[in-house]
Amino acid sequence: MRIKKKDLLGIEDLTRVEIEQVLATAESLKDVSEREIKKIPTLRGKTVINLFYEASTRTRTSFEIAAKRMSADAVNISVSTSSVVKGETLKDTARNLEAMKPDCIVIRHSCSGTPHMLARHINCAVVNAGDGAHEHPSQALLDMLTVKEKKGGIEGLKVAIIGDIAHSRVARSNIYGFTKLGAEVVVAGPATMIPPGIERLGCRATTKMEDAVKDADVIMMLRIQLERQNDAFFPTLREYSRTYGLDEKRVALAKPDVAILHPGPVNRGVEIASEVADGPYSLILDQVTNGVAVRMAIFYHLLGPAKEEG
Amino acid sequence: MNRLVIKGGRLIDPSANIDGIYNIYVMGGRIASVKPAATDTSELNEQSPELEIIDASGLVVTPGFIDAHTHLREPGFEYKETIRTGTMAAAAGGFTTILCMANTRPVNDNGSVTHDIVRKASAEGLVNVRPVGALSYGQKGERLTEMAELKAAGCVAVSDDGVPVLDAGLMRRALEYAGGFGLVVISHAEEPALAGSGVMNEGPVATRLGLGGIPNAAEDAMVARDLTLAELTGGRLHIAHVSTRGSVELLRLAKAKGVRVTAEVTPHHLALTDEAVIGYNTNAKMNPPLRSLEDVEALRSALMDGTIDCIATDHAPHSTIEKDVEFDNASNGVIGLETAFSVVYKLCLEGHLTLAGVIKALTTGPAAAFGLSIGAVRVGFPADIAIIDLEKSWKVEAKGLKSRSKNSPWLGTELPGRVVKTIVGGKVVYDLDKENK
């Protein structure tokens, strides 16, 4: 059964049942990528535009491969925000794209809320591939799929999210997602990077990493933007890494079969030690594999054939 | 000589504590007499061609409103607003005098620009325009403007509104120097290092939306500095668009100490919280940002107890080029002249404000703050009057607005109470009856 949504803008808008439906679809689509002919005809004749206002290799490629494995036509548009012509409003951009009759626009933008504004002006489906510090729903879905596969379920797990919570769309989407599926989420980072009122999203917050990772079933490390040290969010990378980096000693505080996730790209030796990133608990590459399946599932739910609707 | 009589309206004039049914006689553009209707035995020759009679029975009559904070955008940004369209909007909102801010292009930082604005306003404007000159050249915060010349050209205050005066020493000198010419110094109180790259109020809503936050402290810190400087210098300070409960506390303390300070609050800061931003509504983006409910409640009680003196619109027209864009990239500000009274009247109906308090803050409050001999229906004063139908509600729609820009947070909302006539110097400059025809 398909979820009844025109757009996928954030995990905040999804119910537990809807999340579970998308994850179930992703699981069933995973084997397409293992076949010799990695293609199914489900979305033949559909056009997907990947509109990326922010540099991204992994996410854009993943959406593109997902669309192509479903037989949709995928077009990539990369716009450097600085080159956007002054005078063209977001509404103009939306109308121009719409005039090319796409079925879906996948958008990434450094400004929070841009996919929402686009969706208001456009009739085709809009998928948020990351907006500012707001949400990154496909990332959270692939994280949930990865954990679900490894742990058999999400209900009752303790999930620690460590790093720059304030500027992280991955953190927000995962707080919504994991709490909706019954996990306990604890976020940790320096006080400068824990935004006011984050608890209202459903998590607990602490400045002590040890608190968060103790007995955790899942540790999710966030990428630290190296330039944040210039804005006085933390004094030095050295201190950040020593206080909030994931090394083997801190891994040992978690449950013995802890799952370690990172949305990538990894700053080795900063937020995560190399031996942890490459170690036996790391699911970083599984996340990437699952990314394609989850994005195929998203396309299926938003663009799939209407007659299969149940 | 041209005569006008406004008959049988409920006159509310806070300057004289009047609330009752009065007849108002206007001659030569000035108030000739004000008589209680019940005992008024004057006989009017209603056939006289020189006599205009307005029947105001069932309507509220008040001194014309004074807006201490309008951006007219001319010269330089005529695509957003002009002196003509801005004063049309003012008239439609019951405003008969508006103070226009200096952040035009060129900046109103010398007598020639002031002269141009004054000349153009008297030729094309529907209401009285009193310019606010820049405090520093080019609003750069480096050198004081020639304030004697600005005053002579018609400025009533100086301000770098839109940008804070970062240099505390310059602010001190401005307060000292401007006082010598009877000019009020208006402070846009914001500490930019604390506002950072924020685009809305810092708090749970910003966290949820993933938008950068501006803490209350960005305003409080600068209000505290400027109050200290006003105390030091004895200068006349006016705090623009107060938005935080912290500023309110600081103002209360300063006034109790006798610091010569006045303050204004906008209708949107009185009526809306930061939750209006949800959905990334760029018409809820302004500086200072919409704050929390606790702040809103503090602002309302401060207005009622006199800690805040004026309701000012901070009417800030922007075109779709500045507003139909990403939230982070959208310009700050909303228009407000046409909706101001209705927005605060709604708060009266909800029990948050009183009608007498609101009218005071729109008339005698700003008149006293800027030393203007207007804002009262008093014999000898200019006949600047607003007539309001409290029973008439209206829906705010872009096409009905006089302002050239349509960036109102109230689009699509139904508001109670409507200005039906505005009179400037005895002349009707806005008449809702004629609009609808």
Image (tube, coloured by chain):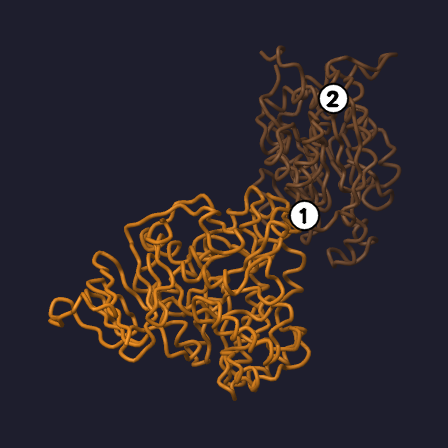
Chain colours: A brown, B orange
Residue at the disc numbered 2: A296
- Give the image location of residue B208, x and y in percent: 59, 43
Which residue is found at the position 19% from the left and 63% from the top?
A: B8
- Give the image location of residue A307, x and y in percent: 62, 10
- Residue B14 position (above or below residue A134): below
- Observer able to see residue B15: yes
- Give the image location of residue A144, x and y in percent: 70, 27
Secondary element at image label 2: helix
- Residue B355 position (above or below residue B139): above
Tag of residue A166: 1
Q: Left or right: A33 with respect to B419?
A: right
What's the chain of the residue with tag 2? A
Three-letter code for the amino acid on which mark 1 is drawn = Ala
- Which image quarter holds the N terminus of chain B? bottom left
- Give the image location of residue A133, x and y in percent: 68, 44
Q: CA distance from mark 2 to mark 1?
A: 29 Å
The answer to which image quadrant residue A20 occupies is top right
Q: Nearer the viewer, residue A87 or A170?
A: A87
Mark 2: few/some/many CA within 10 Å (<14, 14-19, 20+): many
Q: Which mark lies nearer to you, 2 or 1?
A: 2
Three-letter code for the amino acid on which mark 2 is drawn = Met
- Residue A190 position (above or below residue B1): above
The answer to which image quadrant residue A94 occupies is top right
What's the chain of the residue with tag 1? A
Q: Nearer the viewer, residue A215 or B42?
A: B42
Circle nearer the N terminus (2, 1): 1
Secondary element at image label 1: loop
Which residue is found at the position 85% from the left and 36% from the top?
A: A276
